Image: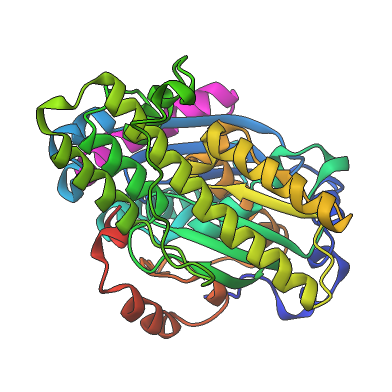
Amino acid sequence: MGQLFPRSLRNTPLFFSSRHFSNSLSNCRRSYTILGLESSADDSCAAIVTSSRKIKANIVIRQDAEHQQYGGIHPYVAVQSHQRNMPIAVKRALAEAQCSVHDIDGIAFTRGPGMPGCLTVAATTAKALAAALGKPLVGVHHMHAHALTPFLSQPEDDLPAYPFLTLLLTGGHTLLLLATSPNSYEILAESIDSTIGFAYDRASRALAMPPHPKGPGASLEAFCAQPADDSELQDLMQPLGVPLHNRMAFSYAGIVAQIILRIKELGDSLNDQTKLALARAFQNAAARHLEEKLLMAIMSCRKRNLDIKHMVMSGGVASNMFLRNRLRSCLEAASLASQSPIKLICPPPALCTDNAAMIAWASMTRFLTQDYDDLTVSLRPTWTLTNLTQPETEDKAWKGRRARHPEVDAV
């Protein structure tokens, strides 16, 4: 397998300047068109993106209704749904982009991390298309794609500047990273048990939130947003304890456990008002946990004389407007205290949740430098973001660290 970025290019300005990163793609002699495929969890996605940062099509076929009865993603059902939906997603993407397969310059797919069976669908589809059409192939790290999404979605005069902080919030990951270049990340904090996305889903189901087209986490957020002042719920909305104080790590299992315990204590007295109080208590605890780790990361970077001007928040949970507003206020307060402003950058909600546009975009530099993968390239379901260019054997330590918490890898 070729390396993510050729060794000869790793120290050039292209990979250490956010502006050069985008402009170099935009200023190519001709626009490259990439078909991206994503099936790492329960969304079947196909997108067509150009090197001039144009999203010509971005198709997402969700499976929420099919998994609702299982209280989470059922692996076998997910794979069957992907097999049924992926051809449809590709056909729709080509139709929406008004192009044929012969107009595609390369095919990108999610290589990992994710659910192994689900990853296989996008991988086999991409390999079959690449082989049949004679097109180059690139496998992409799912979380790396989330981290690079702002370089696709932000105006060119408002791109993140390296180094910057990245908060990646999904159903399978809660990561706070220091990004020093497009392919260099340092993990500052990660979850030691349940992720924030898993916690949102579990709390929503425990509170029996009404169905929502974007899933249980979005249902809890919408339920909390109904017009009711917190002062009216003050007696019911006791704050939840937040774990790991002064430690650079995330833990959401305990926060969810407190919600479940209070539901049991309330018993038959659980009604819409008490549900609202508990849901808002959960959201407040989830936000406080993120805020503390973010402030600790900012202080750590300042001690290392790193000039942080941006904080990128991406991943499915980053579409939560309550969390966005809380973290934006947190950064504004920190900026005032230090007189060193840090701007929060979030992709549009449609590009926060799983999508193939981010997969196509994350592959773009490799296509432009002709750094392709072989058709025999394997999946990496437990691929860590700090080992983007390392052999597959480097994933073993990461897999062992996460093996105690299978629900994190399974969602």
Q: Is residue 25 left or right of residue 124?
A: right
Q: Residue lying at the far left in this picture: please name it.
A: 268
Image coordinates of residue 44 in percent, x first then y, are: 37, 38
Q: Which residue lies at the image location 36% right of the left edge and 39% below the top edge?
A: 43
Q: Residue lying at the far front in this picture: please name it.
A: 235
Q: How is the image coloured?
A: rainbow
Image coordinates of residue 128 in percent, x first then y, are: 38, 52
- Vertical placement of 5 versus 367: above or below? below
Task: Considering the whole magenta stretch, tell me its main secondary structure.
Answer: helix
Image coordinates of residue 64 in percent, x first then y, are: 28, 32
Q: How many marks?
A: 0
Q: Nearer the viewer, residue 32 or 85?
A: 85
Q: Is residue 371 left or right of residue 342?
A: left
Highlighted range, magenta: 78-101
Q: Which residue lies at the image location 42% right of the left edge and 62% below the top edge?
A: 112
- Vertical placement of 242 versus 344: above or below? below
Residue 96 sits inside the magenta stretch:
yes
Q: Nearer the viewer, residue 265 or 187?
A: 265
Q: Which residue lies at the image location 72% right of the left edge and 49% below the top edge?
A: 331
Q: Is residue 43 visible to the viewer in this orientation of the structure?
A: yes
Q: Is residue 182 visible to the viewer in this orientation of the structure?
A: no
Q: Nearer the viewer, residue 60 or 284?
A: 284
Q: Is residue 214 left or right of residue 291?
A: left
Residue 147 sits inside the magenta stretch:
no
Image coordinates of residue 72 in percent, x first then y, are: 22, 43
Q: Residue lying at the far top in this picture: please name it.
A: 227
Q: Which residue lies at the image location 27% right of the left edge and 22% below the top edge?
A: 210
The image quadrant of residue 367 is bottom right
